[in-house]
Amino acid sequence: MMRSTRTRIAAIVATIAMVGSVVTPAFATTYFNIDGSTTLQPMAGKWAKVFMASHSSFPPIQVAGGGSGTGIAALIEGTVDIANSSRRLEPQEIEQAKKHTGKEPREFIVGFDALAVYVHKRNPLDETTLEKLAEVYGEGGKISKWSQLGVFMPEGADEIIRVSRQSNSGTYFYFREAILGKGRDFKLGSRDMQGSKDVVELISKTPGAIGYSGMGYATPEVKQLRIAKKPGEPSYAPTVENTLDHTYPIARPLFMYTLGEPAGAVKMYLDWVRSKAGQNIVTESGYVPLPNPGA
């Protein structure tokens, strides 16, 4: 009789263990790797921290930010679970991923960013146009002095110091397409920074500088310009409202990419990022959340 009781107890314990394994899934991966956009990196770090605090069985999340191109390259090689990107994958990158891994990348929009144009806080300029930005930044552009924009700098330094990003950056790629158009490249001679934060930090210390970076990187030491699509049209600031109603002309989606249809840990994490809890962090980070986040 005692042996029978012990047998029943053992069976109950085994059943509880089986139920526990369903409620708290075991993940095959030791680490969960995310790499890519420096625009997304601070927000991605917050996502990881908040998510891990309430999902103790989830593998440790490692977030890196070498630039969108770096994350996409890692995705093509199959060495990351998720690639963060501030631009869409190019058709050739999709084909490379399929050829190398046998899987087609899947795209997920996780928020929006108004790409802000920054100047020093003491710069008198408050607004400009897409056309003038193209003349400042574009190859063959005729604007190189602040006085050509009707601005007389307090420090007397008339030369415009162009701050840009390195060519593996999704922000670099997007700004070039949105401002210069296809077929036109940047002027030589800009100061090319590794990260989005670096752009704003340099401008904050350089009164004659102008640069572009994510709206979430604003500090009291810099100013975001209002931008008009065309001369004579209203100009708009890079705000949440102006991004959602498409009046601010330099706004873009922010992406996460996976190899193939996400499953397991990858799906769980993506679903949470796109949920109300994850999208609250987008708002807290100074970016624009999805209009209709999941539950």
Image (tube, grey):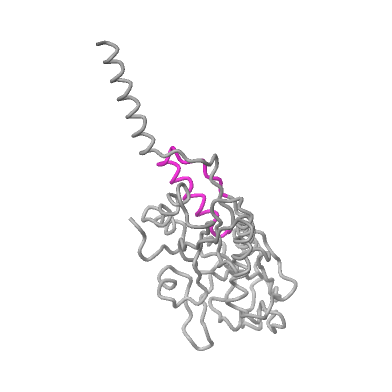
Q: Where 252 falls versus 76 (above or below)?
A: below
The quarter of the image holding the C terminus is bottom left
Q: Nearer the viewer, residue 17 or 121?
A: 17
The image quadrant of residue 97 is bottom right
| Residue that appears at 71% across and 70% down | 190
Which stretch appears magenta?
37-63
Q: Is residue 185 left or right of residue 97?
A: right
The image quadrant of residue 16 is top left
The quarter of the image holding the N terminus is top left
Direction top: furthest residue? 2
Give the image location of residue 70, x and y in percent. Answer: 64, 57
Q: Where 200 falls versus 176 (above or below)?
A: above
Direction right: furthest residue? 189
Q: Nearer the viewer, residue 125 or 247?
A: 247
Q: Is 232 within the magenta?
A: no
Q: Nearer the viewer, residue 17 or 35?
A: 17
Give the image location of residue 278, x and y in percent. Answer: 41, 54
Direction left: furthest residue? 1
| Residue that appears at 47% across and 62% down | 108
Q: Nearer the viewer, residue 8 or 110?
A: 8
The image quadrant of residue 171 is bottom right
Give the image location of residue 251, x and y in percent. Answer: 50, 72
